[in-house]
Amino acid sequence: MGIHASSVSVMPGVGLPNRDAQHATIAKFIQNELDAEREKVALLHQQGSQQAELLREQGAQQFELLRQQQVAAGGSMHSRGLETLKIDISKYRGSKKLPLRWFVELDDAIRARRIDDGDMQAVLAQSNPAGRAKIIIPPGLSRTTHMRLGRWSPQVAARQTFEPPRAEFRARTELLKLKQGKRDVHAYAQHIRHLTSC
């Protein structure tokens, strides 16, 4: 857009009467250049707006196509969050140690399968014994025999079924020894860690 002296110079044979005429010619030339540049900018802006609109339309079409494919595949985006998982539970073999790991697996499986009914939870607990535990489980393990504070818990039912007699008494005795200072806190914590890792 620079002005060269050659473009402003007067052609031979044509003379400008004064400096004002030369300035007017230069101003007219600059104005024409500015108008041309403004037209280019307006054209670029128009093309950019058209391309942005085209990209928006393509994005909307792709989103709609993806949604239709998900619906055709058997579910919408929101229904996938409501599906349940089936988590396998290891078989409880009826060992004398407290089966805390098995209880945790059972609880996770119940949550993953979204089982709210107490009887179904008991059935799931009954379906996973093996070995000696099959002999221990009473056939009448039901919701009515294991009420506790108005709310049935499959952990309570399973503990009552699988734990050796007076296990609760032993746990209370250990805690009492700890409170009286007859047992070391570190040793008690190690004992609890050992029980939870079984």
Image (cartoon, rainbow, N blue to C red):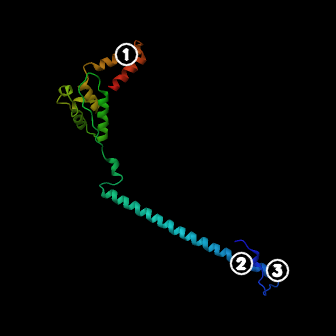
Indicate the position of residue 173 as horizontal and vertical percent values.
34, 16
Viewer-nearest residue: 150 or 182: 182
**Inter-mark Cα distance, 2 to 3:** 15 Å
What residue is drawn where x is 40% and y is 16%?
Answer: 178
Residue 33 visible? The answer is yes
**In this view, 77 is above or below 19:** above
Q: Which residue is mark 1?
A: 176
Instruction: Assign the C terminus to one quadrant of the image.
Output: top left
Furthest residue toward bottom: 13
Q: Are marks 1 and 3 in contact (CB under 8 Å)?
A: no
Left or right of residue 54, residue 92 in this image: left
x, y percentage for residue 131? Answer: 20, 27
Look at mark 2 in the image and give the residue it sits on: 29
- Say which element carries label 1: helix
> What residue sits 37% from the left and 23% below the top?
193
| Residue 114 appears in the figure | no
What residue sits right under mark 3 in the picture? 19
Q: Earlier in the sequence, mark 2 or mark 3?
A: 3
Which is nearer the eye, 60 or 159?
A: 60
- Determine the CA span between mark 2 and mark 1: 103 Å
Q: What amino acid is at disc 2?
A: Phe
